[in-house]
Amino acid sequence: MTNNKISQQEVRRVMLIPGMVRGIVFKTDFEYVKNELGENKTDLLRKKLNDWENPIDYQTIKPLQWYPIGLRVLSLLAIEEAFGWGDKEIFDLGSSSPKYSFPATMLMKYFISIETAVKEASRLWQKHYSVGELVPAKVDEKQKQLILHLKNFRIDPVLCVSLKGYFFCIAHYVIRSKKITIQETKCMFKGGPYHEYLIEWE
């Protein structure tokens, strides 16, 4: 288990990142940790956030209320540090998020067309995040490729991984294939003009 990798100065910097996010994202984090590790382990997560003087009361957060996006980053970073998690575990957390989100569940259940589902996902983005724009750059069912651009969303690399998992899960519900891959082929933290996610299937 890793500890104290994030300084108080970094915590303050993260909290100054402009933007807001709906409370549902914190609910999905907490439920995933509880289901994967057991409710007794959630105390470690709370302690880590308390150490940073940014406690998030996961159980009283209102799903539809807006919260600073910096808290979203701290929630994921606290999970990484409290449990010694890396990219794989954060990806898995992101890929589980749609299961705890009512709008995403409806998206997966009722939108059969890939193109329609992607357009709806772009619309839902604006309902969950006050910053960023999710754009379907390419939808090609013949070449079996889907490219998503996430623009104006330079928040923190931990979200790149979490969202990669989220889009991967959505793809599994709307694409009729058991073999699907996803890559972040452009990243704003690596000089890209936006985040680009390439989804391919067989």
Image (cartoon, rainbow, N blue to C red):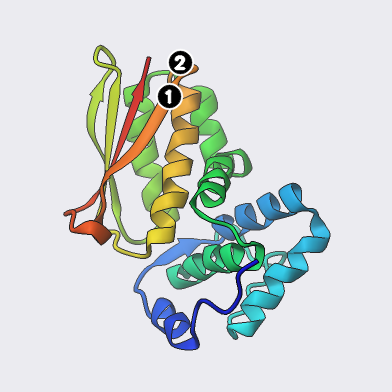
Under circle 2, the secondary element is: loop
Residue 87 versus residue 146: which sits nearer the camera? Answer: 87
Which residue position holds label 2? 177
> In the displayed image of the protein, which residue is found farthest to the top?
142
Amino acid residing under circle 1: Ile
How busy is the neighbourhood of tag 2: few (under 14 within 10 Å), some, or many (20 plus)? Answer: few
At 54% from the left and 25% from the top, the residue drawn is 109
- Taking depth in this image into account, of 66 and 185 the one nearest to the observer is 185
Please, what secondary structure does the residue beneath circle 1 have?
A: strand
Task: Name the residue furthest right.
Answer: 40
Residue 2 vs residue 15: left or right?
right
In the image, what residue type sits under mark 2? Ser
Where 56 sits versus 163, above or below?
Answer: below
Q: Is residue 142 left or right of residue 29?
A: left
> CA–CA distance between discs 1 and 2?
7 Å
Tally of numbered discs: 2
Label 1: few (<14), some (14–19) or many (≥20) C-alpha neighbours in 10 Å: some
Q: Which mark is residue 180?
A: 1
Horizontal arrangement in the rendering, residue 20 relative to residue 94 (left or right): left
- Measured as percent of width and height from the top left, residue 90 is found at 53, 52
Residue at screen point 36% across, 61% down: 130
Residue beneath the point at 43% across and 29% down: 171
Whether tag 1 and tag 2 are in contact, CB under 8 A, the answer is: yes
From what the image shows, is residue 142 above or below residue 25? above
Q: Residue at x 73, y 70 (%)?
A: 44
In terms of image quadrants, where is residue 29? bottom right
Question: Which sits in the foreground, 128 or 153?
Answer: 153
Residue 194: x %, y % from top left: 22, 52
